[in-house]
Image (cartoon, grey):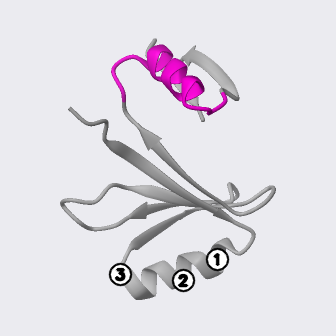
Amino acid sequence: MGAPVTWFEINTKQSKAARDFYAKVFDWKMEVLDGVGYTLVDTQSKRGIPGGIGEARGPNQLVFYIEVDDPKSYLARIENAGGKTVVPVTRDGNGDLRSVR
């Protein structure tokens, strides 16, 4: 079975312009989080996934999150395929394993 993408992020130095663009073109609903520099995105689709638009601190980035049953084994597979672990697997506040990149 495949691993689903569960969240996306668009990080850009022009986040307001990105919000305006995606809302206008795709009718996405935006919830701006005041003082955080981040906007929650509801694609308003039964088949789509939610995401966010943030202010980039470096170069523009498109990030997506993939749900897997064993993060450590997938990080090993990623490294074997030439990828690199930037942040090791950790536990979140619920005790679930999490990894970044």
Element type where label 1 sits in the image: helix
Of residues 22 and 71, which is closer to you in this image?
Answer: 71
Residue, disc 2: 20
Pointer 2 with pointer 1, Cβ within 8 A: yes
The span shown in magenta is 68-84
Across and down, in percent, residue 11 comes to 65, 60
* Mark 2 residue type: Asp
Using the rendered view, name the quadrant where residue 85 is placed. Answer: top right
Across and down, in percent, residue 36 comes to 68, 54
Of residues 82 and 15, which is closer to you in this image?
Answer: 82
Q: Is residue 94 visible?
A: no
Residues at marks 3 and 2, CA–CA distance in whole angstroms: 10 Å
* Mark 3 residue type: Asp
Using the rendered view, name the quadrant where residue 9 is placed. Answer: bottom right
Residue, disc 3: 27
* Mark 1 residue type: Lys
Residues at marks 2 and 1, CA–CA distance in whole angstroms: 6 Å
Relative side of 80 to 26, left or right: right
Element type where label 2 sits in the image: helix
**Earlier residue among tags 3 and 2:** 2
Q: Is residue 75 magenta?
A: yes
Residue, disc 1: 16
Q: Is residue 64 above or below residue 92?
A: below
